[in-house]
Image (tube, rainbow, N blue to C red):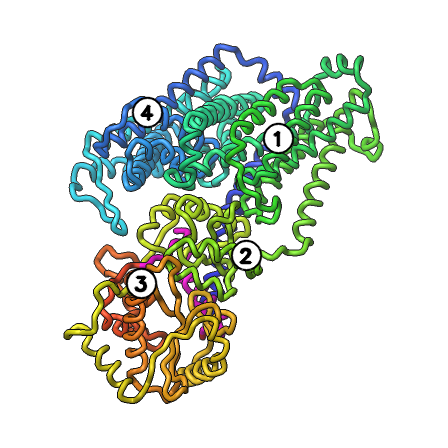
Amino acid sequence: MKTYRASALRNRLRAWLPPLAGALLLVVSGWILHRELQSVSYREVRQALHALPASHLLLALGFTGLNYLVLSLYDQLAFRYLGSRVTRARIALTALTSYAISNSVGFAVLSGTAVRHRFYSRWGVSAADLARIIVFNSSTYWLGLLALAGWSLTFQPPIQSGLFQASMPCLGGLCLALASAYLVLSALRKAPFQVRGFEIRIPSPPLAFQQVLVSMADWALAAAVLHALLPESGPSYGTLLGAFLAAQVFGLVSHVPGGLGVFEGAMLLFLGPYLPVDQIIAALILFRLIYYVIPLVFALLVLLGDEAKHRGEQLVTFGKSLGGYSTRLAPRALSVFTFMAGLLLLVSGATPADKSRLLWLADILPVGLFEASHFLGSLVGVALLVLAQAISRRIRLGYYLVVAALLAGILASLLKAADWEEAMVLACVMVALVPCRNLFDRRATLFNGRFSPGWIIAIVAALGSSIWLGFFTFRHVEYSNDLWWQVALNKDAPRFLRASVGAAVALMGFGLWRLLRPVSPVAELPSDEAITDASDIIDAQADTLPLLVYLRDKALWFNPDHTAFVMYGIRGRTWVALGDPVGPPVPAQALIRDFVEHADDFGGVPVFYQVKPQQLFLYAELGMSFAKLGEEARVPLEGFSLQGRRYRDLRLAINRLANEHVDFRIVDAAEVPAIMPQLKAVSDDWLASKSASEKGFSLGFFDADYLSRMPVAVLEQEGRILAFANLLCGPSGEELSVDLMRFASFAPRSAMDGLFAHLFLWGQAQGYQWFNLGMAPLSGLEVSPVSPVWARLGRIIYRHGEAFYNFEGIRTFKAKFHPVWESRYIAYPGESSLLLILADIAALSAGGYWRLI
């Protein structure tokens, strides 16, 4: 128990530490920004922006375009490495879109992979090859960074004085050594590396050298974009390159999307000796716009165009071929745009309006309308920050609220200062949302889901940054109590104070409501209506596992049309779905994604337990990992016979029962209540003899209503029941199974073997094709030098874990019926601890950890 709690604490720390570390870097960068901007006014920054020649802007745009073309060479080299053939135009478009998304959204492995999966999977690129592309591109990315950083730190370090100056050449030499080691390795290492069974081949020396050159060109051009935006009196390109690379590393370490704030703080620190702060800030603002925002808009337009082009096909195969990657990508990108729109409104509320436009509007509208629209704009900004999370979760109500908020923001922007540029940006975000309405198909409650640590920190940081910007902008104003109540056309500072307090109060109120509101139940046991709906779905399929729904100890999650469902339980943070979704293939496949997202809404870890190998690709497309749990035994009934040596022991068991005058019969479901007292006595005797308690979830337990739903097989001696097994009869007549198998202490030793032999013959006579004996846990785990840790540990438990569970005994008992073995798996998020998940599942079946112990 202590070990489990310690592991749970480590998992919680693991969830909070990365965003907290990023927030700490952001705070340090904010402190640097605040310190450096003490001598700069908002007006000076605006003047520096206007003073930059148009030729510099055009040069920066040209370098940006060239840089993204070079970025496309990453994927071109990767396909050459794979020896796979996809047209260069397709590769270039996919790579450009991918990098435009990942550069701005952050989390490049997730966002960039999602774009590539969307396009490359159409063109025949397998999941394994896609993984190799990601590994190859990641190594290319770091090779250029190491090579250029090594050169810069050695020959033109960004810090020319202080304690760090002496260590710069050593650090640079280390970077160059690492890049050189990769080239040497490509020449010496011919055999591929094996990583958990995944084969990674080292590129040939010419290809490795091209990786270094392409990556160096990428980093050099990115730095050239910023250099073009600096005044000619600024630092040399070589000096800027070193500062740029160091700042980018800080941004990458922070995990803040695009390194926002962290990159700027580092650049201010490095470039401070060369340029006035106002000119640096102006250049950084333009760099963000040109290098990040414009390509991101281009990428979103490409995705929207692709969505429109393939809309008909995607609606048919929604969630089937593209899985979770393609259906999550656009909402995630749109959530970033929504968040940035909210930040834009907050920043607008913290900065002074254009005086000429205010004077023009004053002739038409009353001053009170300016005040109200300014206040409204900041409130809408906070609303958009909060609603961005609902957009990423594809909630339909959130979508409509965001569209309404954007309309209100456009109106506020036009009324408060005729700010048509701001209104145009908000309108562009709304135009991007409108064609994607069909992606927002979730009817989940808007704010029942959790706000992850990253979301909380991002929202607070956005509001805090806008308030800091306001105090920086109006630093010259003498603050007093009277300032709050001043209402006039030229009173920008009071408007900022009122809007900031309103936004802060609104966000605090939302946070308090989230903390104090009653927690909604997240896993209610099924009602009679839900059981009826589930029964209709079960009757249309063949398996017997879904019949465990009648135990009523599992919650049910239906698709919107109630044509498929998942039965699940919750233990701690683990949400365990028992088996694959029940229902027709198409809605069942979409239901996997819905369940994963529903669990994620509440901070849960979604798990699918005892899934079939034929369905594993559906979970893999959602980015889930899987591990083998054991093997399920199924006896073929067609042609089954007790004659011959194969089933000699079963034939003898039946004969012994006959000699002892033990009879076998099937009790129809309608007659089961009449024998319920005898069944209860046998069950209690069996539990007492085994020193066991009732289980649940994936195992049946004695329940009168449950047993009365299905026939029961019994062994009787002179009217006295010695043993029984309740039958799970597959609705299609294909599969037969049993759940509870219990016998009294006074039953003959051959009772279980004889009961199964009778059931095989009875099932064959009824036309069933298979008899399902259930799963043998940890059976069939293959161990080799490349086997994962779970397979090795599972094999050890299987062989030496008799004190906890008779693993080998279960396998041996079922093996004597000569079944066909089929593997069963668990699908789970790869970053989660499998051992903790399995501990939660065991506790869920046992009814708690204490009962498990």
Which residue is disc 4 drawn over? 90
SS label for mark 1: helix
Residue labelled with disc 1: 403
The amino acid on which the numbered mark 4 sits, given as a three-letter code, is Arg
Up-down relation of residue 557 to residue 3 (above or below): above
User: In 3D space, how far apart are the residues under numbered discs 1 and 2 (Cα atoms)?
Assistant: 34 Å
Give the spatial CA distance, label 4 vs label 2.
48 Å
Mark toward the viewer: 4 or 3: 3
**Which numbered marker is on residue 768?**
3
> Badge 2, how many Cα within 10 Å: few under 14, some, many 20+?
some
Q: Nearer the viewer, mark 1 or mark 3?
A: 3
* Left/right of residue 831 with respect to residue 399 in the rendered view: left
Helix, strand, or loop for circle 3?
loop
Q: Which residues are magenta?
A: 824-852
Residue for point 80% across, 17% down: 365
* Quarter of the rendering occupied by the C terminus: bottom left
Q: Are marks 4 and 3 in contact (CB under 8 Å)?
A: no
Is 838 a magenta residue?
yes
Q: Earlier in the sequence, mark 1 or mark 2?
A: 1
With 420 as the anchor, is 618 left or right in this view?
A: left
Q: Are marks 4 and 1 in contact (CB under 8 Å)?
A: no
Q: Position of residue 747 (x, y in %)?
A: 35, 86
Residue denoted by label 2: 530
Question: What residue lies at 52% left-to-right and 30% top-to-bottom?
Answer: 436
Near mark 4 (Cα within 10 A), the count class, few <14, some 14-19 or many ≥20, is few
The image shows residue 254 at horizontal and vertical percentages of 48, 40
Q: Amino acid at mark 2?
A: Ala
Q: Residue at x 67, y 19 (%)?
A: 419
Name which residue lies at 55% across and 60% down: 526
Q: Earlier in the sequence, mark 3 or mark 2?
A: 2
Mark 4 falls on what kind of element?
helix
- Measure the alpha-carbon separation of dots 4 and 3: 52 Å
